[in-house]
Image (tube, rainbow, N blue to C red):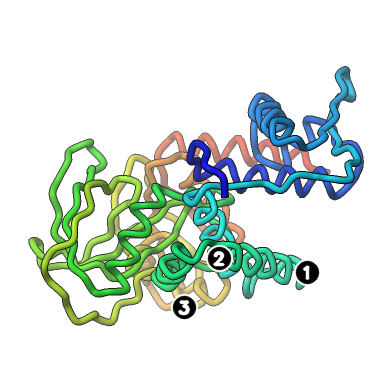
Amino acid sequence: MTSRTPSSEMPGRLLRLLSLLQSRGWWQAGELSERLGVQPRTLRRDIERLKSLDYPVRSRTGRDGGYNLGESSNLPPLQFDDEEAVAIAVSLSTASRQVRGQSVSDGVRVATDSARIKLERMLPARLRHRYHLLVQSIEAGPGPDVEGATMLPDTDVLLELSDACADHQALSFIHVKRDGARTLRHVRPHKLVTMSGYWYLVAFDSDRRDWRSFRVERISSVKYRHERFEPQVLDAFSFVARSFAEAHYRFNATVTFEISALQLRSKYHGTIFGVVKELTCQRCEVSLSADSLDLIVEYLCALLSVDADFDIAADHEVLNRLQTIRARLGTVG
């Protein structure tokens, strides 16, 4: 594997771009950008990067401008450095878990597993063991993440945290809080969790004597402490989901359903990122909170798809967004 500037996002996107180009002839630029979820300028940069790797990508300008992959008897392979290879392998492993049990075709499941297995076999021996420890330390929730794909934080930090989880080795690290304050934490790491496009370390905080979750991208200066511990039983994914539900962020909403909490959970297929409260035997309430307006509206739209009468109380920004969605739906059909 050649050495290049590390990137945790670009390799996976390049693979998707290359796969799309290989799947058919010409692609209009706008359609290709939409399929990849990127801006046209980003697409152009990715096309130029494929060309720099000697892929015969042809382009045409004008109203119907687009791209296709020309024929070649000697297409060069994509080459990645260590960090990129691990990043892609972990992304495929997480995606493989998330598509199981979801409404996707058998072909998608088989293709995802096949790509993961092939890439795992290509990993250098020096990385393979640590990669498997990392995969064993991950708990991924059902269904795709909110942003469509989980963004990997620094691969070295992920590997250090997963090693500690597997070895039951206490750690210290610097964690940056939401307000920007830096704190030194002493923890007993348990599991890594992916949720809503982010990675979290679930660990027992030795100083606070309680379980905590930490955004991995805010962790730095990881150091081993001279302490091993006996692992405890904890559903790490449920712990992070509950922490999400109970926290109070910038945007808030409360939905009151005219069905019981038990009926709501039976009708809703997925994780409810909110606090569910039973009001009566035929009435319940869900409280939601998020830092992102897009995120809380996404939570709400998923909840409101349940076949039940409801009332909403929410911040005016949230209500305005829902009104906009309602107006757009009025134009459908």
Q: Residue at x 58, y 66 (%)?
A: 120
Q: Which numbered disc, 1 or 3, marks the residue that appears first in the sequence?
A: 1
* Pick the front one: 161 or 207: 161
Q: Quadrant of the C terminus?
A: top right
Q: CA distance from mark 2 to mark 1?
A: 16 Å
Label 3 packing within 10 angstroms: few (<14), some (14-19), many (20+): some
Q: Quadrant of residue 142?
A: bottom right
Q: Position of residue 226 (x, y in %)?
A: 11, 67
Circle number at residue 222: none
- Type of amino acid at the residue the image marks with label 2: Ser
> Can you give x and y, in whole percent of width and height, for residue 28 in the image?
84, 32
Residue 122 placement: quadrant = bottom right
Measured along the vertical axis of the image, is residue 35 above or below residue 201? above
**CB under 8 Å between discs 3 and 2:** no
Does dot 1 land on a helix, a strand or a loop?
helix
81 relative position to 214: left or right: right
Tell us which disc is closer to us: 1 or 3: 1
Judging by the rendered image, the residue that carries numbered circle 1 is 107
Q: Which residue lies at the image location 49% right of the left edge and 66% below the top edge?
A: 125
Amino acid bearing label 1? Gly
Vertical placement of residue 272 versus 326, above or below: below
> Comparing marks 2 and 1, which lies closer to the viewer?
2
The x, y position of residue 115, in whole percent, is: 67, 64
Q: Residue at (31%, 59%) from the top-left corner?
A: 160
Separation of residues labelled 3 and 2 (CA atoms): 33 Å
Q: Which residue is mark 2?
A: 93
Residue 135 in the image: above or below residue 274: below
SS at circle 3: helix
